Amino acid sequence: MRKTRWFPVLILAATALPCLANDSGKAAGEGVMSGDIEQTAASDRFKPTHSYAWKESRGAKQNTLIYLFDRDVPADQWADAEDRKSAISGWMLANKATVVSWTIDEDGKADSVQSCGSDGSCRASGNSVMNGIASLVADIKDDGKGGLSGTLSQGSPGCGDQWCEVTSRYSIDTTLAPPTLRNRLASSGKTDSADAATVRTAVTAYWKAAGSAKRSDDLTPYFSAERITENQRQTARNGKMLESMFTQVFVPAHGGQLEITEVRILDASALARVKTRVGSGDQAYDMQCGLLLRKEGGSWKIGAEDC
């Protein structure tokens, strides 16, 4: 049986399909954080009623992310979020909601699942195979027009040709949300925009400040409104640990020479791709990041940062 561990949540041009939607879809079934469904009291089982899904490109790969909720959700607010996963996590913590998310790879196979309780603690597990039996099974049909439907099941292999325990059985019927803002910028953003120079200037100034900052608050003037809100949420939840990671990891990672390799702009949003050298000697390594920016009050502000 695959063992998983609990940990606190810490959130450090493709052509649009005509049926993509900003609404949540349907979900049903039951699941538990651990153990077997049938041996868990009905009141302790997670019973989703709504689902939300989108396709996300990372490099040459494209995964499908499927989120399950036990209540209606503000899906329309997540469409243009700088970091959609962080936006969902923020909503989950604010509403003390239980959330289960599945990642499906480009071949349609289940890759991983994460179950988060109302207290923000999450249990994540990958797909393990024993005796030819997978612990995660996704039977999802993509109709090619933005619709997804099917089942998601999880169990513990190791009992011959069947699961020892059945942890969850869910079904969904939903419509894919639009691609994330980051993916839209990567595919449709303009590289010849007149604003490219001011974006480069904003990124350069931020990077210099980030490499010499003493506290995370020092960077607030450079951040977008959404990133400021996210940082405030993280600080309230993980204050001391967050500041420790900031000074020991974040600041040194921004201390090297910056090279901006590409800038893409779409309306009042931009994506800057950068690279730098982190560390020294045998411990040195190359780091590449994608910085999302928003134009707010006439100035470009740094949003979600993906390194």
Image (cartoon, rainbow, N blue to C red):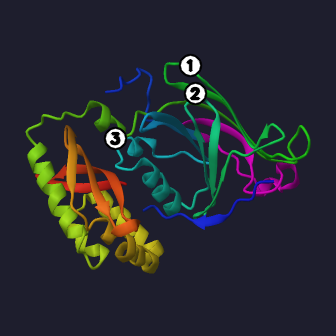
Nearest to the observer: residue 215 or residue 173: 215
Give the residues drawn in magenta, as a range.
25-50
Question: Where is residue 202 drawn, in percent x and y?
Answer: 15, 56
Dot 3: few (<14), some (14–19), or many (≥20) neighbours within 10 Å? many
**Camera sees residue 119:** no
The residue indicated by pointer 2 is 148
- Earlier in the chain: of badge 1 and badge 3, it is 1
Return the disc, 3 or 2, that comes first in the chain's sequence: 2
Q: Which element type, helix, strand or loop, lies under badge 2? A: strand
Does the residue at mark 1 contact the one at mark 3 (Cβ under 8 Å)? no
In the rendered view, tell whether residue 239 sits above or below residue 254: below
Residue 264 part of the magenta-drawn span:
no
- At label 3, the amino acid type is Leu
Q: Which residue is mark 3?
A: 181
Q: CA distance from mark 3 to mark 2?
A: 21 Å
Q: Determine which residue is flagged by label 1.
A: 143
Image-based side of 158 in relation to 3, left or right: right
Q: Earlier in the sequence, mark 1 or mark 2?
A: 1
Side (left or right) of 148 relative to 262: right
Q: Are marks 1 and 2 in contact (CB under 8 Å)?
A: yes
Q: Which mark is residue 206?
A: none
Residue 129 in the image: state x and y as whole percent.
76, 43
Task: Please state which amino acid type lies under the numbered disc 1.
Answer: Asp
Q: Is residue 128 above or below residue 240?
A: above
